Amino acid sequence: MANEMTSTAPDSVQCPVCFKDFKAATINGHLDVCLLKSVTDSSPSTADVSEPPLKKSRISGEAVTPTATVNNPVASSSSSMAVTPSPSVLSFFQPNKSKLSAQSEWSGSSSGKQTAASKGLKRNVPSEAEPGPAGSESQPSDSDRQTLKSSNDLLSARTLLNINKPLADILRPNTLEEYFGQSKVVGQHTLLRSLLDSQEIPSLILWGPPGCGKTTLAHIIASGSKKKGTARFVTLSATSASVNDVREVIKQARNELRLCKRKTIMFVDEIHRFNKSQQDTFLPHVECGTVTLIGATTENPSFQVNAALLSRCRVLVLEKLSVEAMASILDRAVATLGIRVLERDAANSKDQDQSDEHEPKIFIEQKALDTVAYLCDGDARTGLNSLQLAVQAQVSLARPNQLGQDGSQEILVKEEHIKEGLQRSHILYDKAGEEHYNCISALHKSMRGSDENASLYWLGRMLEGGEDPLYVARRMVRFASEDVGMADPSALPQAVSTFQACHFIGMPECEVILAQCAVYLARAPKSADIYMAYANVKASLRNHKGPLPSVPLHLRNAPTQLMKQLGYAKGYKYNPAFNGPVEQQYLPEELQGIDFFTWTPSDP
């Protein structure tokens, strides 16, 4: 039979209904006749209504009984070849017949063979009652988060070592009850909380420092939408997505809204990475409600988000997590991991004793958790990942022959283990972001207020965060004239010398020079007379109505004879030629008698 199959002309095509061979030129006409005949011959009255409906196989286009599939898959595959194929399940064409084997032969004697058309179809996804393909039970899960059936399940020490994702992502909460630290925004009886509970989600811009819960809040919204089926949730990252990706999502959202009456929520992480023209892509679709936009950014949206888009969204300011909020997050993490905390009541240990007795018992000092809460600088991602690193390091140091075998083995995570993972406090500072301007403003105002301790603190905050020392020195030069001025004329040379010294030796040696100048300027007497007087001059020029007054003739220079004839420099009194003060007008006629040190500009 196989020899007959292989000897067939290569240009022949098999009919997917009657499985006979025809030439390519005649297959279309035969298919029309064959389809009508198969529909006419099929009789629904022959089916036995007392038995369950037959299951249609996507692989071979044949009807098989569920009992045969579950109890004896081998027998079902062999007996199914003798059943008449269902006319409603058609196979794809297979023009390349030279690659086919005897599996395409339609005969009861060739059991266990399938049609050639199944070669172009996907395999059926095995259900719980169907045996899957060989090795399917060992396939990995789509996400490590599936290792937690709920937030209260325990992760063993061995599981903790095999996690492929950061702990902050594995333990990401799915409900607002597990979302700590942002009660002002999504706490009980807040407007946003009631909107989220009712699934009336407006377009939002989530603004906050790293690790404060922006992405987590978006995932909580997505989880609620998936449970209630009220909206479709799509996640994009502005660091990798393009405008074409956004347009594709908007196109799908338009179809979902028209066909399924279902909204689409688009979460764009790091939305400030899109430039202003790219952000314009969202405008008409957010305006008309095609998509609900949720953007997350660490930068000030007033500067980084398009003003037109900002007016269509509500800005939620998420604060840096407090130490108390970090403690709650860490407590939830150690409870989930089955880690016992020393110096606590024994009530918590009873629940953790239910873990696998073959796993080592892991303990952690309360001081270690407190250290994480303080050193992570309000960043939950840093805190959880640091805890994971410290625990993994101590579990790895355990002897391999005892790990998972000696239930009496105990592992203690101490404070020094946490500090080893966190070498120093994670200072939130971005030289190109808002924190850069916040810190330099705080330094300037501290020196103006003559608070030398605060001046040193903000200076250290900037330098330890990686700020350019020359930038700080330039601001001190400005401060010496703006705020000290004539009250201490030596402040300006001091600041200029500081800038030159920083330029000569650089960091870290120049940090003490900057500290000396900061303290000098903070202790120096202050006078803003020059700064205010010059500001009044600028206001006078901006508010002047009509053409500006011309320079008086006696103040003009007369290098040529023509200029002298026109009256340039006529009547000018050369001051060194007089022994005493000289009465002479130096301002234009319209401004005679004005004192910019005391003058108050009027509204234009």
Image: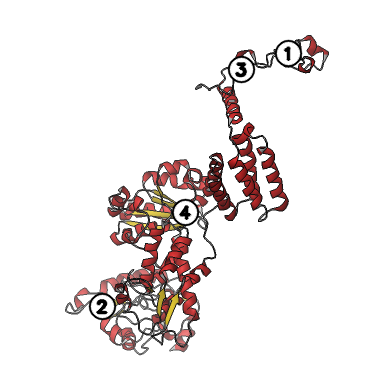
Give the residue at mark 3. 547
Looking at the picture, does residue 492 appear above or below residue 508?
A: above
Q: CA distance from mark 4 to mark 1?
A: 61 Å
Please rate how many residues cluster around mark 1, counting C-alpha atoms within 10 Å: few if below 14, some from 14 to 19, many from 20: some
Q: From the viewer's perspective, is the residue at label 2 or at label 3 nearer?
A: 3
Give the residue at mark 2. 54
Whether pointer 3 and pointer 1 mark residues with C-beta atoms closer than 8 Å, the reply is no
Q: CA distance from mark 3 to mark 4?
A: 50 Å
- The label shown at residue 359 is none
Relative image position of residue 313 (x, y in whole percent):
40, 45
Q: From the viewer's perspective, is the residue at label 4 or at label 1 nearer?
A: 1
Give the residue at mark 4. 209
Please rate how many residues cluster around mark 3, counting C-alpha atoms within 10 Å: few if below 14, some from 14 to 19, many from 20: few
Q: Earlier in the sequence, mark 3 or mark 4?
A: 4
Looking at the picture, does residue 178 appear above or below residue 445?
A: below
Classify mark 1: helix, strand or loop.
helix
Q: Earlier in the sequence, mark 4 or mark 1?
A: 4
Q: Earlier in the sequence, mark 1 or mark 2?
A: 2
Front-most of 230 and 250? 230
Q: What amino acid type should be assigned to the residue bearing mark 4?
A: Pro
Q: From the viewer's perspective, is the residue at label 3 or at label 1 nearer?
A: 1
Q: From the viewer's perspective, is the residue at label 4 or at label 2 nearer?
A: 4
